[in-house]
Amino acid sequence: MTAQTDTPGSVTAVYKVSGMSCGHCEGAVSGELSELPGVSSVKAVASTGEVTVVSAAALDEEAVRAAVDDAGFELVAKI
């Protein structure tokens, strides 16, 4: 899957998150990450553990880690 954005100047990042197993998990992770400043969209896929985040600027990885932790999951890596 190739991430694309229609917004000039936006940044797309893909993260690997462990522990997601259902739609509720996807919603929890997406909800927390959506609260980060500058985030315009989040797509979490439990079956792959991948979370795609589109934001106005590159996100601080520790802020992403904290948001994923708050949702009850673990940020494994930025892909």
Image: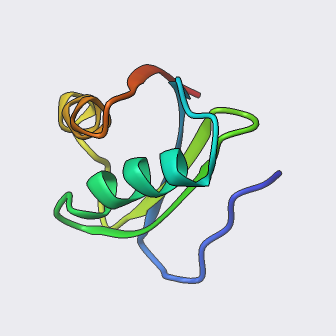
Instruction: Say above or below: 9 vs 28.
Output: below
9 or 62, which is in the foreground?
62
Instruction: Say above or below: 9 vs 18.
Output: below
Instruction: Say above or below: 15 vs 75.
Output: below
At which x and y percent is residue 35?
21, 62
**Quarter of the rendering containing residue 6:** bottom right
Name the residue furthest right: 1
Classify the position of the C terminus by image quarter.
Answer: top right
Q: Residue at x 28, y 53 (%)?
A: 32
Name the residue furthest top: 76
4 or 32, which is in the foreground?
32
**Quarter of the rendering containing residue 23:** bottom right
Q: Residue at x 40, y 47 (%)?
A: 29
At which x and y percent is residue 42?
48, 61
35 or 20, which is in the foreground?
20
**Quarter of the rendering containing residue 43:** bottom right
1 or 9, which is in the foreground?
1
At which x and y percent is residue 73?
39, 27
Q: Residue at x 50, y 82 (%)?
A: 7
At which x and y percent is residue 60?
22, 38
User: Would residue 47 be found to the left or right of residue 40 on screen?
Assistant: right
Q: Residue at x 75, y 37 (%)?
A: 47
